[in-house]
Amino acid sequence: MSVAIKANRLTPYMFLAPAGIILIFALLYPIGYMIYASFLDWSPSQRIGQAEFIGFRNYVNLWGDEAFRESFWVTIRFAAIVVTLEMVLGVGLALLLDRNIKGMAMLRTVFILPMMIAPIVVGLMWRYMYHPTVGIFNRTLKNFGFEGIPWLSDSTWSFIAIVIADVWQWTPFIFILALAAMQSLPRSALEAAEIDGANEWQKIVMIKLPLMMPVLIVTLLLRLIDAFKVLEVILVLTNGGPGLSTEILALRIFRTAQEFQELGEAAAMSNLLLMMLMVLTIGMFAYSRVQEARLARQRAAVEKDAD
Amino acid sequence: MPRIRLENLVKRYGDVEVLHGINLDMDENEFTVLVGPSGCGKSTTLRMIAGLETVSDGEIFINDRPVSNLEPKARDLAMVFQDYALYPHMNVARNMSFALRLQRRPKKEIDEKVGNVAEMLGLTDFLHRKPGELSGGQRQRVAMGRALTRDAGTFLFDEPLSNLDAKLRGQMRAELALMRQKVRKNMIYVTHDQIEAMTLGDRIVVMHGGYIQQQGTPEELFKRPANKFVAGFLGSPPMNFLEAEIQDLSGQPVVRGKGFELALPAEKAAAAASKTSNAVTLGIRPSDLHFSPDASDQEAVDLRVIVSEYIGAQSVLLCDCGGQKVEVELKSETPIALGETLRFAVNREGIHMFDRETEVAIR
């Protein structure tokens, strides 16, 4: 093989190299570091080399750790509830707003604003609104003669409070994706359904939703992955309290490292979270692979008939 | 089955009026073809009948019942769309049975109907396939099958063949004609293809610029076009138009233009005499011109061949006649040379004249 051809083959890798190097340092190295650290009994005062290697003991400890199990459960509950609510609201809004009304472009922009605000700001904003005496919710309730709600000091209400804040911030994400999916639906198929006698509800259930399903499933998985990692808003709003009622995993990890100074254990938790997200991500890719395979099969069938 | 009547149908989009008062009567079991160039309002008219577009003014009557405020499903229609509009997530059987399932008909009846229609259209082997797994022609058939399974009173077709390639289009046209014999229903068919219109329609409605130009049987429209547009739109190759003047040559009326002078039949001369202007557009179809070297001066035109297009048994010659272009058809074996001047006799019935200003036929 001549030198020229060899150089030619290597060219793409050369162009990829900078990105690859950055990935290795910014992603693979920290993950490797974290995995290694999860087998250590390591406090911030030690250098990593001085830490004692304890095998799987961090993981075993986690298994028996009541607080960790609680926060694991809170995370699952939180993710399941917010993603369900956001899917229902987002898709519902998209169904409602998928029409030509004056000012709709403006309205759509307003709808996606919450998503663009920095999470810390969102947290602060909601904390002020939830404030027991000067917050807008309790002031309004009191104006109407009701009693104020202990938004952030009662364990049930504080969970509801973080759910509301998250739904407020992330429904728009589902809304814009669902709206985009809806607007790319074949118009004539919907007209055909109308002529075939479908009413609005039947059109939604029998035509629109099934056709949007691939987009909705990917949206759901994306959102689920994100919901498992939520941190800032809750950190600012409740800091996990009262008790452990709103202490989601990311917050638990943060506190284990920061307050309890158990770097090894925090690393083990991070690892578990990472594996969970990995499963979801793989699920998402698997789903799109299955879709692609189905399309390829259909194309193959058509071509075979044409022969 | 039903009688459909359009009365002063108007469609406006904002300030723009695209249909200007369409009046049309469609008899029971009639196959009506709306034909015209794109943008003529034919699809809009069909979609208004279907209920997919609102009616700006006027009324649509189905069996004397005004329907313009009814939902599509209340009008007892089935429609075949240009892009087939199949439900991509349902297999062929479920596509075809969709309307019946919405009506909650018994499963046995649905299966039977779908089975019958599938057999008629040769779809039996494909009932479990999704639209994505079908070829264009098969999808077209499923769209047709879905409309047939519905068993509605009126069938609407919105350019159903225009997404198919030429060969398949011919095939499906024949199948449609065959289906037409089996299914006695009202059919309204929109197309821009004049061959589809001529071969399928009981009645053809030629539209242009949001107006109906003329309606009638294919033969009426072909033989007695009401104006220059209809004359030029129907027929292939299209009618030749020549600028000319009517003159009286010592008692013998003639139509004369650059490079030709034709004797006018008496009834044409009489019709022309009532006009104030002598300036006309003469229209002659290629099929009314016959190669005939011995024809007399006043029955023939002399044409100089510019281009010869060989298309098999026939050739189409593009010729020059006093600076104007004329197309004629000629048996391919006739020995001719480019640049040669040939004499073509003109059929007396084939002489059409149109007012040069209004383009209305003089007859």
Image (cartoon, coloured by chain):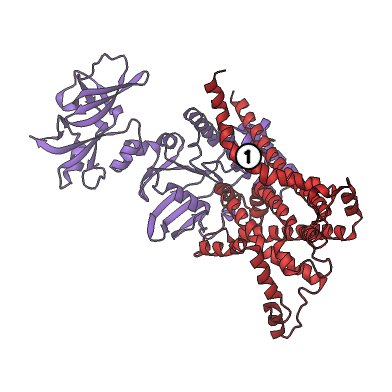
At 85% across and 58% down in the image, what residue appears?
A: A68
Q: Residue furthest right?
A: A64
Residue B114 image point, x, y percent: 67, 39
* In this rendering, position of residue B242 left or right of residue B6: left
Q: Closest to the observer: A174 or A260?
A: A260
Left or right of residue A164, residue B138 in this image:
left
Res. B102 visible in picture: no
Q: Quadrant of the C terminus of chain B?
A: top left
Residue sitting at x 81%, y 73%: A154
Question: Which residue was labeled with disc 1?
Answer: A20
- Where's residue A122, x and y in %? 65, 67
Query: In front: B113, or B83?
Result: B83
Report the chain shown in purple.
Answer: B
Read off the chain for label 1: A
Q: Is residue B36 above or below residue A177?
A: above
Describe the element under mark 1 as helix, strand or loop: helix
Q: Horizontal and vertical percent for residue A209?
A: 66, 51
Q: Position of residue B240 (x, y in %)?
A: 26, 33
Name the foreground residue: B230 vs A84: A84
Residue B26 vertical position relative to residue A150 in the rendered view, above or below: above
Looking at the picture, which amino acid does disc 1 mark? Answer: Gly
Residue positioned 68% across, 35% down in the render? A293
Q: Nearer the viewer, residue B206 or A32?
A: A32
- The reply to whether residue B81 is in sight is yes
Shown colour of chain A? red
Position above or below: B296 against B8: above
Give the image quarter of residue B9. Answer: bottom left
Is the residue marked by circle 1 packed among few (<14), some (14-19), or many (20+) residues within 10 Å? few
